[in-house]
Amino acid sequence: MEKPALEWTSIYEGKAKILFETGDRDTLVQRFKNDATAFNALKKGSIPNKGAINCQLSAHLFTLLESQDIRTHFVDRLSPIDMKVRRLKMVGLEVVMRNRVAGSLVKRLGQPEGTPLAHPILEWYYKRDDLGDPMVNRDHIDILHLATDDVIATIEKMARRINGILLPYFSGKGILLVDMKFEFGTDDSGAVFLGDEISGDTCRFWDAQTHDKMDKDRFRQDLGKIEENYLALFRRVTQHEPEL
Ligand code: ADP
Ligand code: UDP
């Protein structure tokens, strides 16, 4: 793995990414790792080239969203695995948008994987590894002071709009966007931005015809051909090769 430039200081290392300060107070560098975890980090592994593919797919999708007037933290890509982002104060919530039943919803609703939903579902999860990221509602969010009502309303509107942009975008590429997880944050002025990443680690992508999985479920469920599917997804969406 490439070394950071000398003046970069690592300020956080998570399960899939590392954040660096580079001397500019308004920005950070987000580095994408090949490490993969699932089931609250009980399952660990590494997927060759995942960091580069997820970094470049996220950059592609953030750019698409920016062109549709969605504020994202993406500033620039610095290397195959590094992107410069606007430094945000993260809201301690994960927002999940769903178009089909999959993953935890299979158990919660007792419906088979792949069942279409009459309309997209939005869910909130409290980002707390020690609690296993429990699902929470607006009252819980309020009591925990995780965000103001205004910020929550803005995030909800943005998450639904992003799904409304991405669902037809992927459909046009022959890919079914089953569900996805977003993280949002605010800048110094209080403006809300989409942060983190949008990739096969944070979304479920199925081939629209065969329903073959092209995302992290291949790792979670030991389906094999993980790198091949991340690559195939990248090529289909961007129509070019990633820089590896
Ligand atoms: P985790 O913390 O869940 O293990 P990652 O390994 O993906 O996840 O680490 C990336 C971390 O960076 C996450 O905690 C995420 O909330 C945070 N983050 C994402 N975008 C920004 C941003 N623009 N500014 C500050 N923090 C961010
Ligand atoms: N997800 C994520 N990080 C998490 C939990 C979920 O990126 O910590 C994504 C997951 O990849 C899927 C969507 O959010 O695209 C919905 O996940 P679900 O609630 O079904 O949970 P899972 O099956 O991952 O336990």
Image (tube, rainbow, N blue to C red):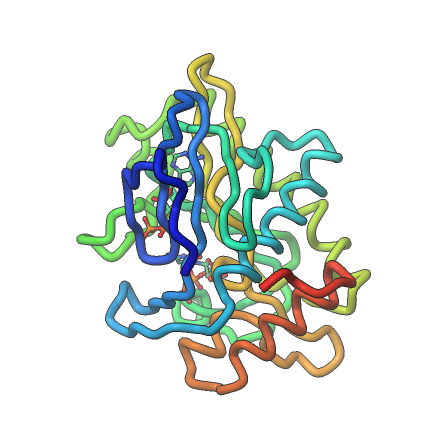
45 lies above or below 182 = below
Residue at horizontal 54%, vertical 60%?
52
Q: Nearer the viewer, residue 198 or 155?
A: 198
Most extreme residue toward the left is 130
Residue at the image position 42 percent from the left and 15 percent from the top: 188
Ligand 2 is in which quadrant of the figure?
Answer: bottom left
Please give the name of the residue rendered at 51% of the width and 25% of the height, measured from the top-left corner. Answer: 192
Relative height, residue 64 to residue 236 (above, below): above
Image position of 30 (left or right of 209): left
In the foreground, 105 or 61: 61
Q: Residue furthest top?
A: 189
* Quadrant showing the N terminus: bottom left
Spot occupied by residue 171 in the image (x, y as percentages of width and height)? 76, 62
Relative to 65, 23 lies left or right: left
Residue at x 52%, y 79% (from the top left corner): 226
Residue 141, position as x, y percentages in the image: 32, 34
